[in-house]
Image: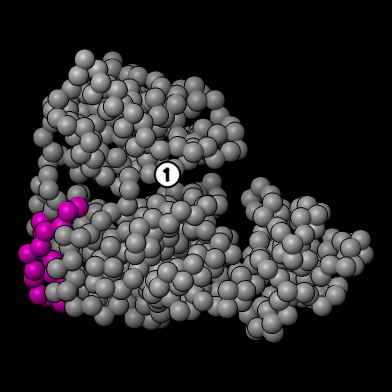
Amino acid sequence: MENLFKQSNVLETIAFVVGPSPATVHSITYDSRKVTTNSCFICIKGQHVDGHQYIDSAIKNGAQVIVGSEKELMMDWYFKRPDRTFVVVHDSKKALASFASAFYQNKHKELALTGITGTNGKTTITAYIRSLVNALGEPTASIGTAGVWDQYGKINVETTTPTTPESSDLYTLFDQLRENKTTHVAMEATSIALEQGRLHGLQFDIAVHSNLRPEHLDFHNTMEHYRNAKLKLFQQANKAVVNLDDAGMSAAIINSFQGELWTYSIEQEATVMAQKLQTQQSGTSFDLIVHGKRYSVMAPIFGEHNVANLLAAVTTCMVKGYAIEEIIRCFPLVKGAPGRFQLLTDYPGRQLIFDFAHSPFAFEKLFHTIKPFSYKRLILLIAGIGVRPSYLRPEIAKAVEGKADEIVVTVDHPGDEDPETVMADVISGFINKPEHLHLVGERGEAIQKALSLADEGDLILITGICMENYQIVKGKRLPYDDLKHIHLFLEQDTKTTST
């Protein structure tokens, strides 16, 4: 631990230290419940919880070093426990990142980091980059909403945030990935994570921009603050990949970025372009234009938005130095993230698609994407989200009204909300209440209900938070799996059919 205080990035965060010379520290954490003997506990202030309130718990659990930004409180604790080391810092968030980086011996600097930011598309672009770069021969991992994946598959790790992990958790992951021989990491960089300093101290080789649309304004308050938070990623990057078709943020990046800049577009002249898109049920064909040279290509992806996402990944690979001919040869191996227009083949005679759609814009894209598909009836499952503002729920109903033959309404992550209230908020958005409307509060049961409504030749769309392995209920993360409920229904359906 003493060596940590000698590293410049750590020294910059420290105001002063009181107490005995620190003994060897075995772990760094901001969660007092995870403190063990000889841990370093760092008090960070979140939206709802202040870590300084848990110093007593951390000491009882064995913390030897306590780091915090509340000077008077830290001194009070020093007089109570002079056998412990108390480190007063200017900013606990920055200190957490700096201490964790030093603790793991700056292993992240051995990784080529690509950060992806934007309102929509981050998870898909991250997955496309991971699959392409792995296919090109560079062991690549991804971190984001779909979890943590390395070159071998999904890694079973506990997630503490929905998308971008807290800084100390990130450095733990980086250390694990280096042990697994990973050399490149593509990760989602959310506006909230950037604003909260979770990515403090990281220097990205490449920053990728997808788009900017209104979201998270309950946190950022204004679109200007939201955009400025995302722009922070480009202040920490050597090279940039920008979507010229996005009016919300592209100009701001281009006008301010000082490094090497590449662009992609479907609608205008750019470094990498796509034209003449044609979607079939096996994927999308289009003309890929790179530096004026045209290539006729096919990729197993669907929707114009996903072509744009693929362009972002292709451009990233080119920035990394790969030839476009090499990249194109890897197109058949492109894989999206679970729950992002994910086709399931487990239901013979029907078409079953998972999609993360939970906003009007996402549903607009989804309905446009399924236009080339042939089907008899459309069975649609939509979900209100309990842990998000209630005013967002009616917008879901407005976005899907008149689009489906059967609509099942359910709840994702009810949190402390009554599922009946969440569903009532959703259906209040219908101008004319659909005739074939089904309210099922528990998501697993709602999925089985949607499947039961489908006949041969129908298309079933399961939307919402359909790739996560938990549901937030009364402050707890309860294990959950959409696929489990699908397989359970199919098993029961098979038994019923056979008898």
Q: Residue at x 25, y 56 (%)?
A: 335
Q: Position of residue 390 (x, y in %)?
A: 50, 33
> In the image, which residues are magenta?
285-301
Q: Quadrant of residue 4?
A: bottom right
In the image, is residue 236 above or below residue 119? below
Q: Residue at x 71, y 71 (%)?
A: 25
In the image, is residue 413 above or below residue 258? above
Of residue 137 and residue 293, the one placed in the foreground of this image is 137
Q: Residue at x 9, y 52 (%)?
A: 278
- In the rendered view of the protein, which quadrant contains the C terminus? top left
Q: Is residue 288 magenta?
A: yes
In the image, is residue 375 above or below residue 244? above
In the image, is residue 105 above or below residue 341? below
Pointer 1: what residue? 468
Q: Position of residue 24 (x, y in %)?
A: 73, 74
Q: Position of residue 36 (x, y in %)?
A: 71, 59
Describe residue 399's horizontal placement relative to residue 277 as left or right: right
SS for dot 1? loop
Describe residue 283's horizontal placement relative to residue 367 as left or right: left
Describe residue 298's horizontal placement relative to residue 214 as left or right: left
Q: Position of residue 68 (x, y in %)?
A: 75, 64
Q: How is the image coloured?
A: one colour
Q: Which SS type dominates the magenta stretch?
A: strand
- In the rendered view of the protein, which quadrant contains the N terminus? bottom right
Whether residue 122 is visible to the viewer of this picture, yes or no, is: no
Residue type, numbered disc 1: Glu
Of residue 220 and residue 413, the one placed in the foreground of this image is 413
